[in-house]
Image (cartoon, rainbow, N blue to C red):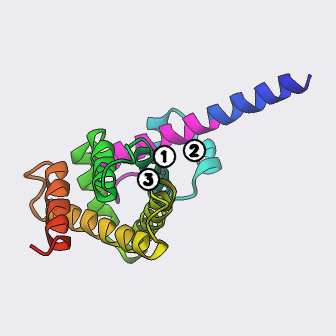
Amino acid sequence: MEQDRSTQEGWREKKRRETLERITDSALRLFAADGYEATTLDAIAEAAGISRRTFFYYFSSKEEILAAWQKGLPEAFRTAVLAEAADQPPLDAIRNAHLKLMANLDAGQAMVIDRILRSNEQLRASNQSKYLQMEQTTFEVLCEMWPQISPRKARMLAMISIGALRLAIDGWMEEQGRRPLADCVREAFADLRAELAGR
């Protein structure tokens, strides 16, 4: 009896997670195709194959959808870093983890989302918060994988690596995505490594 309840709760959680992902994916596709302001909550619900009432069970606004999308990034990054070999320099592992995540990125959609996140004060604040979370996650994973590094050095590496990522994204946006984002990230980390080496 107890196992049946546990199985049922596991199934419910899986279904809830799948619905959440479907809503988020549908919204991001619509934002990219029709624009953020023009996309209605009804259109998102319809694209996700749910009722308006079900939509409001998960989200109360479009801003919340973007926040949910951003919320998953630090954990995905953490998983990617932990999959890296610990016998390489930490900055290389961090760079490689970012590149792995970008391999699955829809560049056009990412560019639209980045523009949306820069479009008003509330969304800009949310975007800043995402980078702070990424920095904290980087610090934690550095301490976990390279315990011989002092916390101060781990904090500094976390800060400068997220700074390099931000500069890469900014450069990519300024170039209107003419080069792959991965190339911009590689270049930013190469510049960082050269600066740290004093060249």
Q: Is 138 inside the magenta-drawn segment? A: no
| SS at badge 3 | helix
Which residue matches tag 1? 42
The span shown in magenta is 16-41
Q: Nearer the viewer, residue 198 or 17?
A: 198
In the drawing, what numbered circle is on residue 73?
A: 3
Q: Position of residue 100 (x, y in %)?
A: 31, 42
Which is nearer the N-term, disc 3 or disc 2?
2
Within-10-Å neighbours for mark 2: few <14, some 14–19, many 20+: some
Q: Nearer the viewer, residue 63 or 82?
A: 82
Q: How much space separates mark 2 and mark 1, taking CA atoms?
A: 6 Å
Camera-near label (3 vs 1) is 3
| SS at badge 2 | helix
Q: Residue at x 7, y 52 (%)?
A: 178
Q: Nearer the viewer, residue 51 or 60?
A: 60
Q: Position of residue 105 (x, y in %)?
A: 29, 43
Give the position of the C terminus as an image quadrant.
Answer: bottom left
Q: Position of residue 3 (x, y in %)?
A: 85, 24
